[in-house]
């Protein structure tokens, strides 16, 4: 069984690994691009590790060293839970190559273990990026014994198991509930979004409660209160705290036993009903009456936009992963409008001038709004049906314009609604409100063109599962991190210039620069000799 499991894991790694693509890429230009982007991703990971160390070091400087272990486990558990539920529906269950894989002479438990362990490996990378730097910050102030280092590394190895199994079970339940309906995609998306809303709501409530304690109380009492709130969110953090702070193996053994037993039970149950679950998910059809209605004629560009819309709405994975940014943008605006910006900024020791705050508004919304851009993956999602698009009597420019126009039509309403909600709640002047709306739309235009350019540079048409494109492809990763970094830098620039220049000067200037950059990228896209960068 171990040999078969290793074979499946090695095959999955070879099909999706960045290292394999670089190793066998024959085009030197494309190979150099992939290496450069790989180095950039390493730099991003280093920044993430540095941020985690800074958080750990800051807690230690405040005398809250006892909070660090539970805080570390809570961060990794919540992030693992969110990312696993976003991809389990089309990766662990009802995946495209299910019939091919199940026809192989492998036991069902081996197939499930290979799928689950591959997801575990990806989550383990993020877990270590959080655990190691935060453990270093904890070691500086606590100076623990050698036993604690063993417990810390051991906990990092088992930390993803419990949230992954919970997310997989919830993902399967969501698919089963929605699969027996005519509008199964909409129901599955709604249930997934409601679940994510619960996670974000609980996190927001936890943060709000964390900023309420009386700061005149002793730091020891503050640390105990924060630890208790962490234990309420992630019960396993209680055992991790006891194991680390008391240097005891028994709480660590209990934590490992809970995680491993939960995983073993989940594996056995899923293996027993795996074929039945997938059969129910892939063969259930609802009855309906079909009638030929009125035939409609549209322009080529609008037909391509409708094609992108049907592709978007037909996939739960596509909607949830690309739509999560739009969802967060609206949620962010509503929370500020209901709770009030003054309460949310109450924990910041410095006061922001109202003009500076309004100047930062478009970029604060642009980060979640453009974080998940459909143009970063829409071209790669053509996959093995690329020849169908190539055979159509349309130009390259029209095809790409159709994909970019769909992204603009999808995201513009969210951009305008969220910006207007915040501007009304903050009682912004009319001229400044127009500047904020203009800047938000220009950010959206630039990110749309930038995503298309990135997807042209790093396409992937050989995928077997759309999760590889939507969540694990080079273009998707670049789209997420580059947009976050860009709008963070622009927000920092507005923060420093806000005291020297009026916002009605800063925002139009940045908007003009973004439009010029988008125009330059469009020109480069038109000059590409190879249509799909292949």
Image: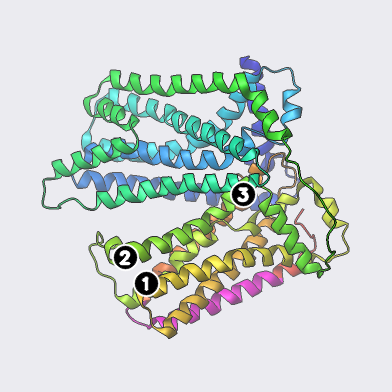
In front: label 1 or label 3? 3
Q: Nearer the viewer, residue 180 or 378?
A: 180
Residue 216 appears in the figure: yes
Q: Secondary structure at mark 1?
A: helix
Residue 37 appears in the figure: no
**In this view, which residue lies farthest toward the front?**
289
Q: Position of residue 122 (x, y in %)?
A: 53, 36
Which residue is at 41% across, 70% downward? 422
Pointer 1 or 3: first along the chain: 3
Residue 453 sits in quarter:
bottom right
Is disc 2 in contact with disc 3, using a CB cutoff of under 8 Å?
A: no
Measure the alpha-carbon separation of dots 2 and 3.
32 Å
Give the label on residue 425, or none: 1
Residue 112 sits in quarter:
top right
In the image, which residues are magenta? Answer: 498-523
Crowd band around label 3 with a 10 angstrom C-alpha radius: few (<14), some (14–19), many (20+): some
Q: Secondary structure at mark 3?
A: helix
* Magenta highlight on residue 513: yes
The residue where tag 2 is placed is: 340
* Magenta highlight on residue 480: no
Give the label on residue 168, or none: none
Q: Position of residue 64 (x, y in %)?
A: 21, 42
Which residue is at 14% across, 42% downward? 221
Magenta segment main secondary structure: helix
Q: Position of residue 144 (x, y in %)?
A: 24, 29
Q: Position of residue 103 (x, y in %)?
A: 76, 22
Q: Does 178 sit above or below residue 153?
A: below
Q: Is residue 373 left or right of residue 69?
A: right
Give the label on residue 186, or none: 3
């Amino acid at each position: 069984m171990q040999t078969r499991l290793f074979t499946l894991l090695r095959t999955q790694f070879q099909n999706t690994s960045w290292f394999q693509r670089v190793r066998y890429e024959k085009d030197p230009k494309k190979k150099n691009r992939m290496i450069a982007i790989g180095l950039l991703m390493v730099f991003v990971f280093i920044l993430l590790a540095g941020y985690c160390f800074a958080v750990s070091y800051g807690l230690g400087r405040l005398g809250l060293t006892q909070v660090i272990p539970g805080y570390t486990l809570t961060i990794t558990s919540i992030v693992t839970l969110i990312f696993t539920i976003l991809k389990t529906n089309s990766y662990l269950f009802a995946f495209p190559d299910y019939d091919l894989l199940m026809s192989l002479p492998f036991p069902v438990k081996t197939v499930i273990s290979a799928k689950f362990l591959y997801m575990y490996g990806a989550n383990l990378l993020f877990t270590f990026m959080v655990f190691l730097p935060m453990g270093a910050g904890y070691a500086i102030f606590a100076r623990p014994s050698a036993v604690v280092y063993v417990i810390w590394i051991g906990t990092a190895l088992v930390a993803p198991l419990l949230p992954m199994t919970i997310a997989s079970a919830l993902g399967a339940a969501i698919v089963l509930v929605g699969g027996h309906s005519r509008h199964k995609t909409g129901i599955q998306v709604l249930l997934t979004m409601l679940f994510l809303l619960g996670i974000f709501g609980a996190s927001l409530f936890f943060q709000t409660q964390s900023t309420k304690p009386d700061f005149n109380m002793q730091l020891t009492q503050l640390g105990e209160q924060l630890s208790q709130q962490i234990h309420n969110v992630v019960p396993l953090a209680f055992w991790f705290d006891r194991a680390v702070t008391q240097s005891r193996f028994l709480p660590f053994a209990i934590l490992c036993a809970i995680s491993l037993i939960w995983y073993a039970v989940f594996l056995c149950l899923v293996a027993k009903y795996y074929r039945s679950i997938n059969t129910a998910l892939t063969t259930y059809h609802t009855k309906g009456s079909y009638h030929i209605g009125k035939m409609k004629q549209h322009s080529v560009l609008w037909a391509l936009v409708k094609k992108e819309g049907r592709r978007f709405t037909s996939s739960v994975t596509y909607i949830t992963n690309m739509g999560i940014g739009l969802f967060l943008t609206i949620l962010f605006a509503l929370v500020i409008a209901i709770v009030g910006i003054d309460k949310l900024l109450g924990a910041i020791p410095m006061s922001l001038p109202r003009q500076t705050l309004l100047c930062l508004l478009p970029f604060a919304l642009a980060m979640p709004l453009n974080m998940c851009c459909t143009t970063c993956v829409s071209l790669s999602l053509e996959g093995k049906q690329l020849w169908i698009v190539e055979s159509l009597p349309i130009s390259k420019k029209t095809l790409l314009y159709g994909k970019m126009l769909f992204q603009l039509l999808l995201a513009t309403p969210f951009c305008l609604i969220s910006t207007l909600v915040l501007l009304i709640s903050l009682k912004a002047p009319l001229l400044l409100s127009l500047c904020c709306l203009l800047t938000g739309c220009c950010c959206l235009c630039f990110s749309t063109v930038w995503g298309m350019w990135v997807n042209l540079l790093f396409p992937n048409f050989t995928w077997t599962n759309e999760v590889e494109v939507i969540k694990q492809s080079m273009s998707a990763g670049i789209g997420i991190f580059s947009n976050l970094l860009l709008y963070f830098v622009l927000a920092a620039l507005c923060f420093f210039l806000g005291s020297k220049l009026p916002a009605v000067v800063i925002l139009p200037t940045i908007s003009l620069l973004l439009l010029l950059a988008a125009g330059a990228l469009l020109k480069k896209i038109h000059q590409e000799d190879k249509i799909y960068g292949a």
